[in-house]
Structures are given as C-alpha cells and as structure tokens.
Amino acid sequence: MDRLRRAALLTQLIERLRRRGSWCGETHVQKATLFLQDLTRIPMGFDFILYKHGPFSFDLRDELTSLRADELIKLEPQWPYGPRIMTTDRSKYIQGLYSKTLEKYNDSISFIAEKLGAKGVADLERLATALYVTQRAGTDASIDKRAAKLTALKPHITRDDAVAAAMEVDCIIEEAAK
Amino acid sequence: MPKSVHEIRDPIHVFVRLDNHEREVLNSRPFQRLRHIHQLALTYLVYPGATHKRFEHSLGVMELAGRVFDIITDNATDEIRARLEPLNNQDERRYWRRVLRMAALCHDVGHLPFSHAAEKQLLPNGWDHEKLTRAIIASDDMKAIWERITPPLRHEDIVKVALGPKKANDLLFSDWETILSEIIVGDAFGVDRMDYLLRDSHHVGVAYGRFDHYRLVDTLRILQIAPSGEGDDSKEAALGVEEGGIQSAEALMLARYFMYSQVYFHQIRRIYDTHLMEFLSEWLQGGNFPTDINQHLRITDNEVTAALLEAAFDNGKAGHLHARRIVLREHFKVLYERNPDDVKINPEAGKSVFEALSTEFGREHFRHDRYHQSTGAPDFPVRMRDGQIVSSLAVSDTLNRVPIVSVDYVFAERSIVSKASAWLRKHRADIVKPREEEGDNG
C-alpha cells in the first residue's frame, strides 16, 4: 500500500477513535491499527512484536513520525500524561484524494473504532495481547490455554482478566468475520 | 602484577577503561575489523575530518553504557526494585552490567563496509547489519570468550541487549532486558546515539552535536508513568530523567535534529551514498555482500576503496561509471528538494517530480532520495522535584517544537541539470499536484 493511501486510512482511524471517546495516545493508535490490519485484513504492512503495553509496531511508530513531519497529525500535550494524537486540516485534503479507499474500508474502520474507542490502555493491552496469542495459538486453542499464555507473557495481568480478554477477542473476531 | 584494568585515550570520554575480558573482545577479529569501517561512510568527501571509525565509537558506547547502568541501578526506587528483580541481587546485577558492556562493545560488529550506505539493497532479503551482528555474537569464536567469563555470559542475553526488541523481534524480552536494551539503542537516551552525536560532531568540526551529556547521564532514572489519563494502572518502566536533567535532554534532542539536518542528511553526502551503492551492486559478486561470517569479516572499507580507485580509471572494470562519480567528484546535483509549499499539497512531491523527469528525459539521468527520521516523539517520563512523574512533552515546550527531519531530493546528472531544471520550472505546478486515486487497489 502506498504511503499517502495509508496516511488517509490512519488519519481517518484516529478521527473515528477520538469521536468514540478515545484518549488517542500512541498506544491507542497502535492497538487499533493492529486490530484493523490483522482482523479486518487491511494490508497496511506493519509488523507487530510483543513490547510495552502488548503488541507494538516500530514501523507504525516511524510512520506516525513521518505523518507529523508532513503535518497530517499533531501531538496535543496533556499534563501530566503522554500526548494525545489529533489530525490536522491537511489530513482532510489527503483523505479527499483517497476517498475510494476510505469508502472501501469505511465499515472496517467504524467497527474497530466502535469496539476499541472507549477502552483505556490497560484494556487495550489485555485485548491486543489476547489477539496476539490467539493468532498464534488459533481460536481452536481453549480459552484457558490462551489465558495462561497471556499471563505468562504479561505477568501483571491477572488470570481472570486474561480469561475475559480471550473471550472478548473471540467475540470481536466472530463479529469481524460477519 | 599484570594489569586487570586497561585504559584507552579517547577524544570524547578522555579515558575508556576495559577489563581483561573486554580486552579479549577488543582483540578479537570482528572487533579489530571495525578499525577499517568509517563511522560516517563517505561523509569525509564533504567534511574532511569525518574519517573516524566504528572502532572508537563502539568503545565510547561501552564506556557510556557502564556509566548509565551504574547511575540507574544505584538510584532505583523501591517501586522499581519490586518490578525489576535483578536490581535486588548483587550477583545478577554484576552479570547484567557485564552483558550490557559486552553488548555495547559488539553492537556494530555486523556493519558492512561504509556502514549504513545502502545495506538494504546490498544484502539478501531478510538480512541487515543487525542480523550479522547477531550471528557474530553467537559465533563459536565469540562464544568461547563468553564461556571463559565467570559466570559465563549467555550469548542470547548479549544479542537481546545489543539489538533491542525492534531488531531481535523473534525473541521475547523481560522488562529488565527491555530497559537494558534501551540503554544502548533506546529512542530517547540510547548511548549509541549519545556517543555518535558527540563523536561525529567532534570529527566533522561542527558544534551542533554537543550537549551536556555528563549532566544528562547523572539525571537518568528508571521511571514508571501511566501513558494516559484514563485512571487505569497500566504502567511500564522506561528510561527517564529527573527534572534537573530536562534541559540536557532538550539539548540532546536539538543536537539530534541539527546533526541530521546538517550532516547525516546533507544532500551531497546522500548522493555519494547512492553512487556508492550503485558501484557496489555492480562490483560485488551477485550484487550482494556475503552473509557468511568469515567472508563478511574479510571485507572492509579498505578493499572497497581500492576497488573504487581502480575502477574509476579503468572503463573495463565493473562499476566504472559510478566509481568515477565518486573518485572524480562528478556526483549528481540536486534538482529538487522538499519545501513547505509543495508538502502542503503533496507530501510525496519528490516522487512525482522524479517520475515526470524520468519520463521526459530518461530514468538513468535522475536519482530520487526520500528519507524520514525514524524515531518516535521525544516522550519519556520526568520525575518532578515534588516526586510526581510526568510526560516530557507535558513539561517541555522545547521538546514539543523540535522539528522532524525529512528529506526528499531529486538529483540529476550534471550534463542534464540545466535543461531538466528549465523544464521543471515550466511544469512544476502541474507535476507536484497529486492525482486523485483512479481505482480502489488499496
């Protein structure tokens, strides 16, 4: 996927997440992009690894930096926390150029924003790590088995929270497939 | 009595001190090879002082890594100690200090001749210099060194700390290992970057890269902060600073910006990298550098320079044309570069200009060079004097305003510059204007 097309998708995702009440820091954008790419099969080309707060893409981090360089997004400092990400007027122009792509993926972006927009970092970490585990173990693997793997990877997540995250991810996967 | 600590004079850190095991690494073949790898590739053709090598940089990274380790482990709070087990055990702490210094020493051993210049195009798919570094650290010769140490060092630990999660992305990192790798390759306070900014600045002869690294290192801490104000407790440990170090951190980020914009992304330096890559792809057997470790260790800047000089004056040699462009300074000239007006309507304007010129005059006369700074926002935790931990971007207006370096050059062969330039002036507005997408091939 070429860079400007991807910029149109990312900026629209950021706008929809914020509209759904997301804090929209980098962690929120990272997790939402993972779900958008891996669950709804939009070929954005980001590689995710397990890192701080769960799956993380260094490519996406670089891409967000280049979107800032092109003034398509900007950071909004929020004392005392990390900054929130917001789009600029210039991003509207790029979205206008890629209206067909955005139309094609409109439902997918709305679906992800609806499912994740209201969630905080802790929830997103659990869910994204559960997705990461499920993708490697398969949905055939039992909830218990995946929850055990999740807590092994992220020891600060409780067993109950891990089970709940694995179950919620199964529901999201099922809905996304419809 | 034989010495157990060895001192090496260094223009940046005054002395770099090594123990016997570290000196064994220094004496190893992979490390000695770094004496013949320029830190800044062909930058010396633009800034004549830039002839320093990866060898002294690697020593500097080890020196700084040791200092940072001592500061952050001596000053860890109870909350951090509860989270990072090795901080509570002296043997563990000693083991990991040694791993860190060895990782710092070895972090660049996989570099190709002339460092970063075009490694993506000159290695087989899936390879980069970090993968070569990893293979060298895990090689039998190096493993023999790790195993002679008491307790023996696990080569996997050295690999993780030297490369970090971004490059060793098939390995799982504990919180502790992540912090240690941040000391070397971290976005904000990696000592790799600290050393190269200071050292490159010194050798290039510009003051841009200097910052108060003594103060910065002294104020580094392992800190935890919630990334957002959603009332949850998802905190991760990261390298941050005391409030008193924020100005030194700002100076580091500004140094990075100035060095990238004035030295690393200097337009002539960039086109020399392109000419060198084109020379190498014709000169190397099969167009790629070898990935076999023994063959890798045999080739340095010296062999490539000798071949360049030979090819420049012999039109029967592979890479003759590209070698001439470097050796006789007949490099391509800048025809187009990124500017704010064009970026407003087309962030990829350079690509459009390159394509249009190539269609009109032939692709062989032009080169396109697009590169973005590849780091995140300078967002790290800061511990205020009252104990509150806040985001650096919440506390520093300066950090919020550090520009991001992004280059977009189109270069042209000298013989065609005037003609192409006149043509571009005439058609530029139309060329730069982006086209709306025609299909939905996303």
Image: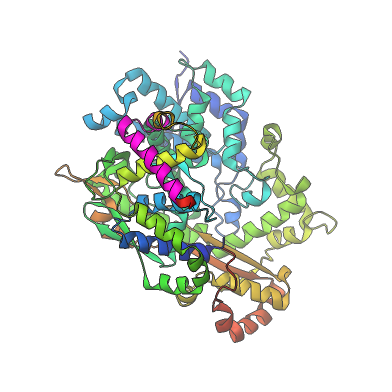
Q: Which quadrant holds the N terminus of chain A?
A: bottom right
Residue A67 inside the magenta-drawn segment:
no
Q: Position of residue B270 (x, y in %)?
A: 58, 60
Q: Which residues are magenta?
A: A149-175
A144 up-or-down from B340: above or below: above
Task: Return the x and y of residue A80 as percentages of the image width and height.
Answer: 21, 51
Which of A177 and B347 lies nearest the eye of the viewer?
A177
Q: Residue at x 38, y 39 (%)?
A: A167
Seen at 24% across and 49% down, the residue is B230
Could you say which is closer to the camera, residue B100 or residue A81? A81
Residue drawn at point x = 38 percent, y = 64 percent: A73
Q: Please give the count of numbered marks on the rendered protein.
A: 0
**In the figure, residue B276 lies in which quadrant?**
bottom right
Residue placed most toward the observer, B32 or A168: A168
Image check: B333 left or right of B248?
Answer: right
Magenta region includes residue A164: yes
Decide: is B184 above or below B202.
Answer: above
Q: Is residue B188 visible?
A: yes
